[in-house]
Amino acid sequence: MAFKPLHDRVLVRRVKSDEKTKGGLIIPDTAKEKPAEGEIVSVGEGARKDSGELIAPSVKAGDRILFGKWSGTEVTLDGEELLIMKESDILGIIA
């Protein structure tokens, strides 16, 4: 992919959610919520302090993350739906 986010932004691919509940019930598409879990595809170079010093991002490509329900901007790149969000919108990294 020929896209690199700027500054402290990251490009995220949502992780597919389960089609069934633990009890075996099938969840229809209309009742599903978009997952708040994803994988980082690409990371910008980081934010800058007032002094101009670069603050390196805490995440890297390939990390699995949790983010807020309304975080990011949805974009379509190469036919794939992705999210662009600021690093501060990320709640945590899944180990």
Image (tube, rainbow, N blue to C red):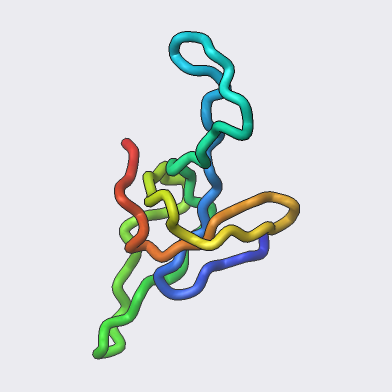
Front position in the image: 8 or 75: 75
Residue 19 image offset from top left, x and y in percent: 57, 23
- Asked if residue 39 lies left or right of residue 67, the reply is right
Name the side, left or right, on which 82 lies relative to 49.
right
Q: Is residue 84 left or right of residue 59?
A: right
- The N terminus lies in quadrant: bottom right
Residue 57, how many percent across, how many down?
Answer: 34, 64
Residue 45: name its quadrant: bottom left
Q: Is residue 93 above or below residue 3?
A: above
Quadrant location of the C terminus in the rendered image: top left
Q: Residue at x 54, y 18 (%)?
A: 20
Q: Position of residue 68 (x, y in %)?
A: 38, 51
Position of residue 72 relative to residue 28, above or below, is below
Q: Nearer the viewer, residue 23 or 53?
A: 23
Q: Quadrant of residue 26?
A: top right
Q: Position of residue 49 (x, y in %)?
A: 27, 83
79 in relation to 22, above or below: below
Furthest residue to the right? 79
Tell which residue pokes out farthest to the bottom in this image. 51
**For residue 14, above or below residue 11:** above
